[in-house]
Amino acid sequence: MIDTRRLRTLRAVADHRTVTAAAAALHLTPSAVSQQLVALEHEVGHRLLERDGRGVRLTSVGRILLGHANEVLAQLERAGADIAAYTTGTAGEVKVASFATAIGLVVAPAVGTLRDKEPGIQVRVLDAEGDQSLTMVLDGVVDVAVAVEYRGAPAEDDRRLSRIPLYSEPFDVVLPRGHALADRIPADVGHALADADHPADAFSATDARNALPAPGRPATPAAGGPGLPITDPADDTWIGPGLSVADPAGDTWSGPGLSVADPVDDTWSGPGLSVADLAGETWIGPYPGNPCHDVIALACEHAGFTPEFAHSSDDFSAVVALAAAGAGVAMVPRLALRAADLSGVVIRPVAGPERRVFAAVRRGAERHPLLVPLLDTLQDAAAALRHTSA
């Protein structure tokens, strides 16, 4: 009989690539993790890990067992959800990790709504970038992650997670006043974009919830960051559970029963900028590892150049302030501009890059009675983004 606790340990080592990092995530000592892995190898009768530089990697048998472990652990999450629904209903604590802009836009409104509707549910919110929050969900540190699509994110069909699309927003170019590209369209149009009259495309909350019980199709994860497969945010489609999304850079973004106009088109009518216009500029942006850094870098790569980041900050208000000081140019998600002082900069739309935001839970946990109301209110808050400024 295989001990499921040892399966969790195996998955943590596969995700973090070292025994030490897995031990920290599991709140165990490295010695305890090593002992569990040795015991698991004895249970299955095969070696499961082998050295890989300073870390470890799964053997062929280890990868086979990990696939089954993901299914077993997801089923245990479902069992826990069903038991909780039968015995306790909706009373308890839920932990949510989210990046700062989404906390203000969807998490905080959802917390307020939930306090009125489900006073027995206590929500604890932790500020974390998307790459951190997804790992925190997988490690069991939090229950829900609100994260951004990027190359290192778990794929849509990753068997460890269920994902729920929330909203999508374009990036805008932030230029110092007097920059040569600032005259491409009238300045007042650029500032109108920052006011976000049409800030984001939001999935229909009903569409997403109806699709939630079928969290995706099984597939073999690709190689990516530490234990995380690669998905390309520049793909023409983003396929969520039961949803098929057309190219968001085109005229419409469509899902089942859902057609959302491009939020840029109905705000301005000029030609705007292309990412290629920014080749050779000095850049200001998030640190490497921040999902937005990856989206910006990928957009520049597709335009044929590598951006030179001379200044780095994960605070977009600081990024805008540096641009106002003439330190360089930046691309910033449109909704993040709401909190920034735009008096010293010019904002221009740019075709292509987007910040696509989704919620993620461990697969099988999406039916937990504490999580269902929270996921519902997150989707409602995301859907309201478009209507608040309509």
Image (tube, helix red, strand yellow):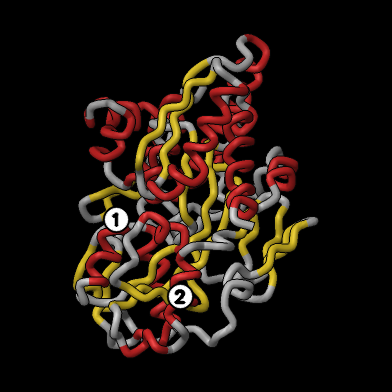
Label 1, residues with CA under 10 Å away: few <14, some 14-19, many ≥20: some
Check disc 1 and report the residue beneath it. 315
Residue 227 visible within the image:
no
Q: Position of residue 258 (x, y in %)?
A: 75, 58
Left or right: residue 44 versus residue 266 is: left
Q: CA distance from mark 1 to mark 2?
A: 21 Å
- Compare marks 1 and 2 and give the one earlier in the sequence: 2
Residue type at mark 1 is: Asp
Left or right: residue 120 versus residue 293 is: right
The residue located at (42%, 50%) in the rendering is: 101
Q: Single out the mark in the foreground, 1 or 2.
A: 2
**Residue 200 occupies which quadrant of the picture?**
bottom right
The residue located at (54%, 35%) in the rendering is: 110
**Residue 181 occupies which quadrant of the picture?**
bottom left
The residue located at (69%, 70%) in the rendering is: 252
Left or right: residue 343 versus residue 229 is: left
The residue located at (51%, 78%) in the rendering is: 351
Residue type at mark 2 is: Gly
Q: Position of residue 294 (x, y in %)?
A: 38, 65
Q: Position of residue 371 (x, y in %)?
A: 58, 29
Whether residue 185 is situated above or below residue 144 in the rendered picture: below
**Residue 288 occupies which quadrant of the picture?**
bottom left
Quadrant holding the C terminus: bottom right
**Mark on residue 190?**
2
